[in-house]
Image: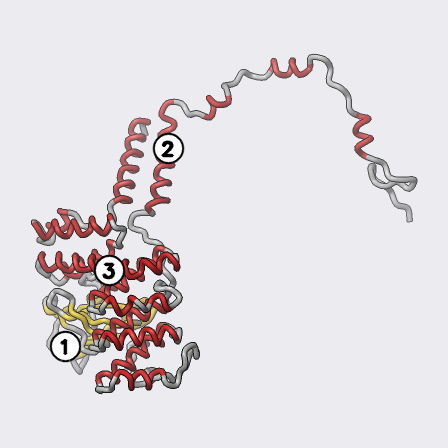
Amino acid sequence: MKSEHAPGTDAPDGPADPCLELAQLRRAAPPGFTARVLRRLPPGRPAMRRLWPEGWQWAAPALAGAAAALIAVFGLPGLRPAGPATGLVVVQFELHAPDAEQVELVGDFTDWQRDRIRLEGPDESGHWTARVELPEGRHEYIFLVDGRRWITDPLAPAHRPDGFGNLNAVMNL
Amino acid sequence: MQPRLRIRTLLLAAGLALRSAIVPAEAPTHESLAAHGIEGPAAEVLLAAFAGAAREELPAAALRARLDEGLAKDAGPAAVAEAVVRRLEMLRQARELLSPDADRARPEPHEAEAALVNLARALESGVPAEVFADVFPRGRGAFSPRAQALVEAAERLHLAGVGADAVAQFLRDALDRELRRMEALRAAEFWIRRHREGVAPEDIRRALWGARSPGAGRHDDEPGRGPHRRRRNQ
């Protein structure tokens, strides 16, 4: 079988140096060539002037930069850094209130806002219930019956005065 | 859009962003307080409390929670202001307790805030600061999840009427045994049950830790874990 050698590879009679071959091909530029090329180039602005925006062009990038700096320092308003990942726990709340027309659950997990979690009921035994998914940790809550009576969960593991004349339930999940 | 109009819009947006960044979203205003019937001295006290929290880099969200709780419960302006100021004082006290450990532990901001609020709530519940004072340096940092669980356990014990000395001893024992979160809380429940039965602290301690040397790891049959515990979790 016959093999062919590409230029620059080892020939059977010895290796050829490609750098030497290229050096033999090099020729000097004719006199005045560089000056002629530069004369034909279009005139341009100085480098510094091109970098500096004219008129009000600077406003947008400057404001964007200032906003980015503010966000970097203070963070986005309304957004908090993510806390440690915690598991969620389904908790069943129940209250015996056979005469109630409406029972709500209000706590730190509702940001102490009403009308977020309503218990269902009453069942035949007078119990109101709600199943709520909560993150692990400490939670404080209280029931609101008929929109006017604050009732402490008697089944909660702990209670503490809320400073407003009621007892909050405290649970640790 | 005209260039001038574009510039004005950008300046307005930058101004709003700056204001939002400097004034915490949780902070109330005269108008928002007045909408809930809080005006005059109580409003000034509340605004000063939020300004103080911002100045001292304390979490305004913890104050906002107390404010929202008071508003939801239709509490009087003076009571709301008092509750918020007390929360601020507890945050300050909590930071004093945590500061020595913060230099060593270098917690993330969200960890530091969670620990601060957790401790402040425990103090607010009446747990004496001395209970925590010599406990945190024993563990691997007051900002760890285990330390947070112990703060909660201490609050539970205190609310159940367990004395400060016994609570402090419980925390030391639990720290030495490196209890996980639920282990610590179940151990606290065990202590509370025995306390309510009238058992002396030393006897409870012996029953709780007697078979478990420090660093012994997890025991699934530890006291407090069993069907007698009220199952709220499904």
User: Dot 2, how many residues are within 10 Å of its Cα: few (below 14), some (14-19), or many (20+)?
Assistant: few
Mark 1 belongs to chain: A
Tell me residue B84's x, y (percent): 17, 57
| Residue depicted at 28% across the width and 40% down the height | B18
Marks 1 and 2 belong to one chain: yes
Tell me residue A156's x, y (percent): 22, 76
> Element at badge 3?
helix
Q: Is residue B24 above or below residue B198?
A: above
The residue labelled by disc 2 is A62
User: Dot 1, how many residues are within 10 Å of its Cα: few (below 14), some (14-19), or many (20+)?
Assistant: some
Point out which mark residue A26 bears: none
Marks 3 and 1 belong to one chain: no
Residue B209 falls in which quadrant of the image? Answer: bottom left
Which label lies toward us, 3 or 2?
A: 3
Relative to B39, B22 lies left or right: right
| Residue depicted at 23% across the width and 52% down the height | B53
* CA gap, disc 3 and disc 2: 42 Å
The residue labelled by disc 1 is A97
* CA gap, disc 1 and disc 2: 62 Å
Point out which mark residue B93 bears: 3
Residue A93 in sight from this viewpoint: no
The kind of residue tagged 1 is Ala
* CA gap, disc 3 and disc 1: 40 Å
Tell me residue B21's x, y (percent): 29, 44
Residue A55 in sight from this viewpoint: yes
Question: What number of labels is visible?
Answer: 3
> Element at badge 2?
helix
Mark 3 belongs to chain: B
> Element at badge 1?
loop
Q: Is residue B206 above or below residue A66?
A: below
The kind of residue tagged 3 is Gln
Mark 2 belongs to chain: A
